Amino acid sequence: MEKYVKLGIVITGILTWILMAAFFQTVINWINPDWDIMLIGRQFTVSDLLGLGFGLAVLLTMWYHSTVNKLGMEVAMELKKVTWPKWSETRVTTIVVIAVTLVISLILAFFDLIWGHVTSWIYRL
């Protein structure tokens, strides 16, 4: 279970890196685009380095924070207790949701058509 919690922390760090790199790129381009110089080819710029630093900081903070690890383990243990639906149940409920959505859409379209005629009749008076 602990390996999944650690994997989740690593994925959070990587996503933080990607999001913060885009954020820093936007901010740097807004202030002065010349500041976002290429460090290692065209794919790694100053904004990417700042995002990487921020992602590593988040990763290390979460990795060594006992409360985060404890919460992750509790969530993982609760997810083990979940009873997941079988494929046939999922398929049937999906069909029911689609059918109900179509029926309600038709009912709303009918009411919209009626109210459209009523309001156009009122405006013609």
Image (cartoon, grey):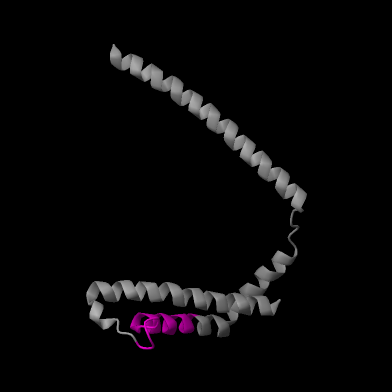
Residue in front for this viewpoint, 88 or 85: 88
Where residue 22 sits: x, y (%)? 38, 72
In the current view of this chain or complex, which residue is farthest to the top?
125
The stretch of residues the image draws in magenta is 39-58
Name the quadrant containing residue 118: top left
Image quarter hosting the N terminus: bottom right
Where residue 107 sits: x, y (%)? 54, 27
Principal secondary structure, stretch drawn in magenta: helix
Where residue 51 sits: x, y (%)? 41, 80
Residue at the spot x=58%, y=34% of the render? 102
Residue in front for this viewpoint, 57 or 97: 97
Where residue 3 sits: x, y (%)? 68, 79
Name the quadrant containing residue 46: bottom left
Please tell me whether residue 84 is drawn above or below residue 58 in the rendered image. above
Please tell me whether residue 64 is drawn above or below residue 107 in the rendered image. below
Please tell me whether residue 121 is drawn above or below residue 63 in the rendered image. above
Residue in front for this viewpoint, 42 or 119: 42
Query: Seen in the image, is 75 located left or right of residue 31?
Result: right
Name the quadrant containing residue 116: top left
Residue at the spot x=64%, y=76% of the render? 5
Please tell me whether residue 14 is drawn above or below residue 64 in the rendered image. above
Residue at the spot x=67%, y=74% of the render? 73
Residue in front for this viewpoint, 84 or 30: 30
Number of callouts: 0
Residue at the spot x=38%, y=83% of the render? 50
In the current view of this chain or complex, which residue is farthest to the front?
41
Find out whether residue 118 is within the magenta segment: no
Image quarter hosting the C terminus: top left
Query: Seen in the image, is 99 located left or right of residue 46?
Result: right
